[in-house]
Amino acid sequence: MSLSGCGRMEAVFSAVFLLCFALNTGVHGDRLTVLQAPEFVAFQKGDWPVSGEKIPDLVALTMGFSVQEDLAWPGLKAGPLFQRPRANVLVVVRGVDSLALPQSVASYPLENPVPFTMDSVAETVHSLFAEDTPVVLQLAPSEERLYMLGKANAVFEDLPVTLQQIRARLSQDGSVLASLPLNSLSRSAEADLLFLSEVQVLHDITALLQRHRHLAKDHSPDLYSLELSGLEELSRLYGQDSPQYRDATAILASVLQKFGQDVYGLYGNSSVVEVVTVKTFEAPLTRKSRSILESKQISNPGSPYNLAYKYNFHYAVIFNIVLWLMIALALAVIAIAYNLWNMDPGYDSIIYRMTNQKIRMD
């Protein structure tokens, strides 16, 4: 066989190997990266893939909440019953499959990257800690979508929401433009300004949290959900091989690393910070506008007999009440039976005592 034929065969084998590797690890290579986590939230290092639709359940489990369906995923171990993180921060970055985040707890491949929301987790936080008014913040600057609940209405009332407000914020004091190495990024291009606006929002969130440090000292857990799509616009406009896209990727990786460290420190090293990087979602996201206070009937649509689920969000509370009540009643029965067995009727019982005296008098 000639040298040219060997080269062709080697190229074919290399292409087949890369194709098999892509099929095994996912076409897009999307990732779920845990930037920060306390010791009692035990993430195991490994390459176990997690489905995109299970991200809300994973966030709920890290916060100590129950989920309707068991998450058969070995990446998260069961933690202590009476310890929960004070906050969970989830950042979704669209337009890139992975970021260089060396200082992370663990990283896992993401399969089936379908759109998801944190509405179910927000409802759980609101229903369980309504009196404590926890902070619930869901923000997507590119879509000008904002949802705040509890103390977030007072803390983040000055947070710029619309693109016009954020761009005006870039020209004020304390802007990130003065500290970021823009390199090939422009201050006048629309796509570049969208990306820089999202970086500014991350900076403003940490600044507001530092101003309101009392939020990290209450007993109610806080929830933050942020969606960033500036890289997606840069990729669409300039291409992934452009210097603008490479510079923006490096800037965002550095900003997210610092953002995770700041939030983790503000909450007393008791918060979970995750970053989901997805090149593109497989289906468009359809959001239903409904009230957070709307009552939801728990039923099992997959059962023809309209049976309820085996347990709901209050299962852990009910289980502990029943368990310890049964233990207390069992100990009480044992103590009563022991005392009755060792009781002397002539001295310990007033009935037998009166009977003995009457017999003696007769």
Image (tube, helix red, strand yellow):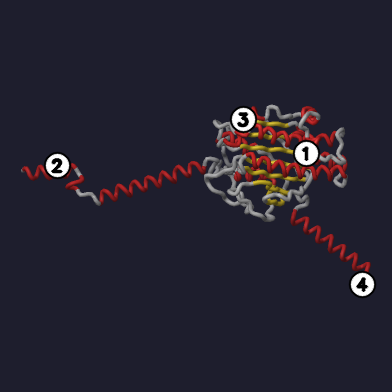
Q: Secondary structure at mark 2?
A: helix
**Label 3 Cα crowd, 10 Å radius (few <14 / some 14-19 / many 20+):** some
Q: Of 40 and 328, which appears nearest the observer?
A: 40
Q: Amino acid at mark 2?
A: Met
Question: Which of disc 2 and disc 1 is earlier in sequence?
Answer: 1
| Res 229 label | 1
Q: Amino acid at mark 1?
A: Ser
Q: Marks 4 and 1, how far apart in space?
A: 51 Å
Give the image location of residue 10, x and y in percent: 87, 65
- Residue wearing tag 4: 1
Question: Which of disc 3 and disc 1 is earlier in sequence?
Answer: 3
| Res 102 label | none
The image quarter containing residue 116 is top right
Which marked residue is nearer to the observer: mark 1 or mark 3? 3
**Label 1 Cα crowd, 10 Å radius (few <14 / some 14-19 / many 20+):** some
| Res 151 label | 3
Q: Marks 1 and 3, how far apart in space?
A: 27 Å
Q: Of 103 and 353, which appears nearest the observer?
A: 103
Residue at position x 79%, y 37% in the image: 179
Give the image location of residue 114, x and y in percent: 72, 44
Q: Secondary structure at mark 1?
A: loop
Q: How many marks?
A: 4
Q: Amino acid at mark 3?
A: Lys
Which marked residue is nearer to the observer: mark 4 or mark 1? 1
Residue at position x 57%, y 43% in the image: 84
Determine the residue located farthest toward the left in the rendered image.
362
Question: Which of disc 4 and disc 2 is earlier in sequence?
Answer: 4
- Residue wearing tag 2: 354
